[in-house]
Amino acid sequence: MRKAVSRIWTAFAILAAGALAAPASAELIGDAQRGATLFERQCKACHQIGEGAINRVGPQLNRIFGRRAATGADFTYSKSMARMGADGLTWTLETLDVYIENPKALVSGTRMNYRGMADDQSRSDLLAFLRTLSDNPQNIPEAEPTARMTDHDLDPAILSIKGDPEYGEYLSSECVTCHQPDGTDQGIPAITMWPEEDFVIAMHAYKRKFRPHPVMQMMASRLSDEEIAALAAYFATLGQ
Amino acid sequence: MSLNRRLFIGTAAAMTAGLAAPWVRAQTKPRVVVIGGGPGGGTVARYLAKDAGDALDITLVEANPIYTTCFFSNLYIGGFWDFENLQHGYDKIAAGGVTVINDMAMGVDRAAKTVTLAGGQVLPYDRLVLSPGIDFKDGSVPGWSADQHAEIMPHAYKAGPQTQLLKKQVEEMREGGLFCMVAPPNPYRCPPGPYERISMVAHVLKTRNPTAKILVLDPKDKYSKQALFEEGWQKHYSGMVEWLGPDMGGGVVEVRPDTMEVVVDGEVTKVDVCNVIPGQMAGKIAQIAQVTDDNGWAPVMPDSMKSKLDENVFVLGDASAQGDMPKSGFAANSQAKIVAMTIRGELTGSKVFPAKYTNTCWSLIAPEDGVKVGASYEPTPEKIASVTSFVSNTGEDAALRKATYEESLGWYAGITTDIFG
C-alpha cells in the first residue's frame, strides 16, 4: 500500500521489535468503513458477507483470508479458479489485491464478471473491510495473513513496451511444448488471443511469484520485459 | 507470419509455372537431412519446414512409418493410456513440406557429405541432423543381450512391441509372483522412467495380483524424484516394492534368462518377470558417423547442439552429450528448436537468437497422483548448464497431484502436436 493511513502497534509487534530492534510496525490495511460502502456498491450484487452469508452468484466471503482459492464449501468454481487453487493460490492480502485490481490478470478464466478496481486506496479500503470478517488473528503483523501490503503494480513503462511479434514467435517455441497454438485447453490453459496487457500482467505475476505455478514461475523468471512483451504481441494474434 | 508465407508460396508458384518446373528450383536449395523422427528429429524437420520450407530441401529419415513415444508408455503399462494413443504418423510433417523416407540410415560419409540408406538410396546434405535416440551397451548386464534375450526379459525401453510384451507379462504373472527390474546406470534415457514404471507395475499388481512383489536392483545410490517415489510407494503400495541400491548388491547383478533367475551379489533368486534396462549409448548411426566419444555419446557445442567433431553435423536428444539436461523427449524437443534456428540462420541468413533450453518431466505414481521436475538451462562455454529448477514436494495434497496429472495429459497433447503437427 502506498499511502499509510495510520500505524498501530500491538503488544506482539512491540515484543518482536524489542528483540530485533527493528521497526515491526504494521500498516493498517485501509478504511474498513469506506470498504463496507464499496462492498455494498460493487460486490454485493453477487457476493454475501457477514452473519448468515450464503453462496449466491459468487461464493460467500467470510473467512476469505488464508483460504485456498476455489475451496469454499458448496460452490462450483470455474475450471481456471480450481486450477489456481490446486496450484496453491491462497487468498492473502497480496493475492486478493492483485485479483481485485484485475481479476482476469490473475485467474484468466474466472467467472467473476468484474472489470477490476483500479484505485489503490479503494482496494485497500475494501480489503480492510473483508479482513474484519476473517477470523484469523487480526492486527498481529506476524500472523498469516500479514497485514502489510506490498506494491504489486507493474511499472507503466513495462506495460507500454511495444512487443515484437516476430521475436515473440521465436520465443514462443518454448511455450508451445505445452500450450497448444490452436488454443486447445486441456489440462494446460490456452494462451492465444489474450489482450496483450493481460498477458504481460499475468507473466509478470508469475515472474514476481504472485501466481503459484512452478513451471510458469521458472519460465517467466528468465524472460526480460521485452521478451514478455514480444510473446504477448505474438500470442495476441495467434489463431485469429 | 503464416499469411506472409502463404502469399509468398502463391506468388512463387505463379512465377515458376511460367518459367520452369519446380524441381529445377528445388535442386538449388540447401539440403538438410534429419535422421530419426522422434521428439528431436521430428521437431527439427517440422520447424525447418514451417519457418524456411520455401528455402530449404528437408528430408526426414525414419525407419518406422509410425512412431511410438517412449514418454507415456509407462502409463500404457499401468492401464492409463491406450497403445494407439502413443502412436503418431508422419503425414502432417510430410504435408508441411518435408520429404519423409521410411528407411534405415546405414552409413554416413562426412567427407562426401552423404547418407546411405538400407534401400541403397544416397542422400547428399549440406547439414546433417542426427537424433537417433539410444542403443544398448552389450555386456552391461552379464547374461543378457538385446538380440538374444529381449523376448524373455524385455527392456521395454524403446517403445513398441517391447512395451506390449512387458505389459502382457506383468498382467499374466503368476499369483504372488516376483517382478524384477534391473535398473540402468547413469546416464540413460528418461531419469524418472524406471521408477515411474515400478509405480505403474505396482498399480497393476495391487489391482490384479496383490500378493505379488517387486524387486528393483539398482547400480545407482540415488535417482530422480527418489523422495517422491518412495513416499508414493509407501502410501499406495506399502510392502510391495523392495529397492536394493549398490550397497545392498544392486550393482552386481547377473541374469539367467533361460532359467528366469537373477543373481544378486552371488545369491540366486527366482523371478517371474524380469525387466532389464541396460546401460546405454547414442543410437547406432551416431556411432557409425563417428561423432561419439569414448563413452558412446556425441559431444556437442552447448550453444547450438552442433557436433564438436563436424561443423556440418548436429546431434541432439538422448544421443548427445551436452551437459546438465536429462535425456528426455521434452529436452530433445527443446534442443530441436535451437538446432532448427541455427541451421536456418546458417543456410538462409535468418536471425539467430541466443540459445535457451527447458525441460519438465511429469511422472505418475498412482491414479491421479502426478509429480513433476523441471529446470531451465543456458549454454556456458563448457556445457549446457542448469539455471533454475523445481521439483514437486512430498506431502502435497490430492488436488495438486491431480492437477499435475491433468497437466501432464495436456503436455502430451501439446508436445506431440509440436513434434508431429
Image (cartoon, helix red, strand yellow):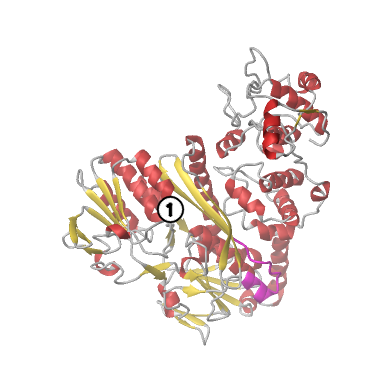
Residue, far left: B259
Kind of residue indicated by mark 1: Leu
Is residue B95 among the parts visible in the rendering? no
Chain at tag 1:
B
Query: Residue A118's spot in the image, x, y percent?
Result: 81, 34
Query: Residue B396's spot in the image, x, y percent?
Result: 49, 39
Residue B72 is a magenta residue: no
Above-or-below relation of B289 to B217: below
Above-or-below relation of A232 to B256: above
Residue B345 is a magenta residue: yes
What residue range appears in magenta?
B342-357
Query: Residue B179's spot in the image, x, y percent?
Result: 26, 51
**How many marks do you count on the picture?**
1
**Disc 1 marks which residue?**
B86
| Residue located at (76% from left, 45% from top) | A197
Position of A104 with respect to A159 (left or right) is left
| Residue located at (40% from left, 70% from top) | B281
Position of B401 with respect to A229 (left or right) is left
Is residue B340 among the parts visible in the rendering? yes
Query: Residue B270's spot in the image, x, y percent?
Result: 18, 55
The image quadrant of residue A105 is: top right
